[in-house]
Amino acid sequence: MKTLTLAALLAGTACAALAQDAEPSERTLVTGEMLQEIVAEAPYECANYDMDSDSCEAVTQLTFDGDMVAGTARSLFADDVEGTVMGTGTLEGDRICMAPDDITMQLQSPDSTMNEMVQNQFMAAIEALGTLCTTYYALEDGGYVSVTTQADGTPIPDGEEGVQFFGQEKSLRAVPEEIET
């Protein structure tokens, strides 16, 4: 089920080959201050960027207002079903944290019954996970890895993702897995 991945997208995470290939020694922590500077110049976080198609599996637009952060993540699934996750949170030291009450999800598909079912499953998964926190690490190649955990540091499924930041929004390409109904 892509529910957890949608939750992770807003927090900046999902499973990526880049993250799987990166050894911890190759990562450098991105401080909260550095993250604010990165996002000020390049507010679009791109998950699993593909240079050939200049596209992403998910695009999250992040904005900071002091220690407050807002994000809108979009992803495209099979049959042109688009999911949008929106949330607000806080920058707590070097990580962005969002509570379940501050996260919403919308699904746009021709099947309104599926929309409601997936939205309900998504919110149930978010509630079960509790507050999600994301920390970013810079890689030697110029990319980043986002690592999302529960507030206490417990890893979540698909909690690491290779990301890049861009000044302009990239197009979406379909996420490989389909939404289960």
Image (cartoon, rainbow, N blue to C red):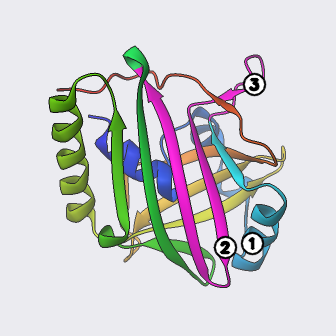
Q: Which residues are magenta?
A: 48-77
Residue 71, percent from left and from top: 55, 60
Name the spot of residue 159 as percent of width and height, x first: 45, 51
**Front residue of this view, candidates 67 and 160:** 67
Tell whether 162 sits left or right of 150: right
Give the mark toward the camera: 3 or 2. 2
> Badges 2 and 1: C-beta atoms under 8 Å apart?
yes
Residue located at (85% from left, 60% from top):
41
Please give the residue where the numbered disc 2 appears in the rendered image.
64
Label 1: which secondary element: helix
Q: Label 3: which residue?
A: 54
Hey, what amino acid is under mark 3?
Answer: Asp
Residue 155 vertical placement versus 3 (above, below): below
State left or right for residue 100 relative to residue 141.
Answer: left
Q: Are marks 3 and 2 in contact (CB under 8 Å)?
A: no
Q: Is residue 55 magenta?
A: yes
In the rendered image, residue 87, in percent from the top left (x then y), is placed at: 45, 63
Q: Residues within 10 Å of mark 1 (few under 14, many from 20)?
A: many
**Amino acid type, mark 2:** Phe
Please give the residue where the numbered disc 1 appears in the rendered image. Answer: 36
Looking at the rendered image, the disc whose residue lies closer to the viewer, 2 or 1, is: 2
